[in-house]
Amino acid sequence: MSDYFISEVKPNEKTVLAMVDRLLVAEGIKRDANLDYICAMFDDDYNVVATGSCFKNTLRCFAVSHDHQGEGLLNRIVTHLIEYQISRGCLHLFLYTKTDSAKFFGDLGFYEIARVDGTLVFMENRRNGFSGYLARLADESRAAFPENEPPKTVGAVVMNANPFTNGHLYLVERAAAECDILHLFMVSEDASLVPFALRKRLIMEGTAHIKNIIYHESGPYIISSATFPSYFLKDEAAVIGGHARLDIAVFTKIAEALHITRRYVGEEKTSVVTGLYNEIMAAELPKAGVACVIIPRLEADGRAISASTVRTYLREGNLEALRPLVPETTFRCFSSPEAAPVLAAIRAASDVVHY
């Protein structure tokens, strides 16, 4: 074992990547399309005997050759990846693993967050990470509505709002009108063309007239690179489905903690990712006692209002076409000099349409 060595695998190392893929396939795993670091362990003959990878703050795609089981190689791979993550400033780490490997990662200091269909376990390296997150959500709820009597109808909306449109506003208004309290989770991952600080401000300004909303930053537990990277990157439908089920499994625990009984989503006809996510929510959420309420999309000139269309107009500099699609607060922002850096990023993007 002392003769084995671990090295990063670069994207242009096709031969080594082929060996990594063969090893993963032998373990019933397909290499994730969303990886930003891959490592491999080699023997004296330069054969890949173990592998592991990262995407942002997640560890994934682990495999050890059957011929080398029981030699502690996976432990060394995980240690290497943790050291790499620390070196780039990622301290709060997440991983996916098969259910039969969960105990192994538990012994390495990872704690279970949620399971999917008894086949996938989602874990983190902080004992009180998720429980602390749930406690913070409860504190935010009590601070906003300190009444002793629990509300009868509690709903939730999760939105990226890239940027906030009249479609988003319509969804929130419909949901808030049907609920005593509406929890509005704002996707806080900075993986969108409009940065989170601005998205959050536009959401809160655009909904300031609605008085029964409790605002939450989603953190790493709702639609993030940890739970749902396919939301931000193109991927095949099977992988999108797995990510969606994981995200929903986490959300059901949040719903239980906050007594959420309804989740509102906008009807989706154009985005592959969001459309599939809605289908899975409609099937899975009721099993946890949460109704999935799909609201028809608001239209303008016979077309559904979408953030993709708004971004297209912003890239073209067509503010007049933008005006009927967004609240006045969003329009004022993108008509002002403060929006210049965001507009530059949108113009530089190769694609502004959400997959």
Image (cartoon, helix red, strand yellow):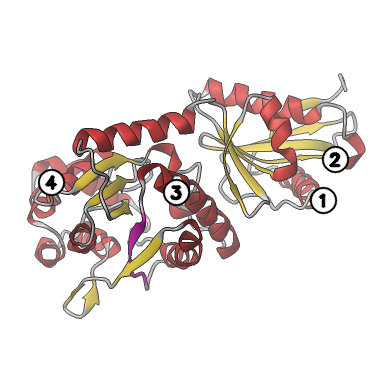
Q: Amino acid at mark 1?
A: Ala
- Say which mark, if any, is on residue 26: 1
* Proximity of marks 2 and 4: CB atoms separated by less than 8 Å: no
By secondary structure, the bulk of the magenta-drawn segment is best described as strand
| Left or right placement of residue 37 versus residue 22 in this view | left
- Say which mark, if any, is on residue 205: 4
Mark 2 crowd level (few <14, some 14–19, many ≥20, 10 Å Cα): some
Q: Which residue matches tag 2? A: 65
Kindly report the distance in space between the C-alpha atoms of the residues bearing marks 1 and 4. Answer: 52 Å
Mark 1 crowd level (few <14, some 14–19, many ≥20, 10 Å Cα): some
- Say which mark, if any, is on residue 94: none
The answer to if 113 sits in the magenta stretch is: no
Where's the N terminus, which quadrant?
top right
First to last magenta residue range: 261-268
Q: Amino acid at mark 3?
A: Phe
Kindly report the distance in space between the C-alpha atoms of the residues bearing marks 1 and 3. Answer: 32 Å
| Left or right placement of residue 13 versus residue 66 in this view | left
Q: Is residue 301 above or below residue 65?
A: below
Query: Which marked residue is nearer to the observer: mark 1 or mark 3?
Result: 3
Work out whether residue 335 or residue 235 is closer to the camera in this orientation and state it.
235
Kindly report the distance in space between the C-alpha atoms of the residues bearing marks 3 and 2. Answer: 35 Å
Q: Position of residue 144 (x, y in %)?
A: 20, 37
Kindly report the distance in space between the C-alpha atoms of the residues bearing marks 4 and 3. Answer: 25 Å
* Proximity of marks 1 and 2: CB atoms separated by less than 8 Å: yes
Where's the C terminus, which quadrant?
bottom left
Secondary structure under tag 1 reads: helix
Q: Quadrant of residue 51?
A: top right
Q: Which residue matches tag 3? A: 251
Residue that lies at the very extreme toward the front in this rendered image: 149
Mark 3 crowd level (few <14, some 14–19, many ≥20, 10 Å Cα): some
Residue positioned 77% across, 53% down in the render: 28
Q: Position of residue 214 (x, y in %)?
A: 23, 43
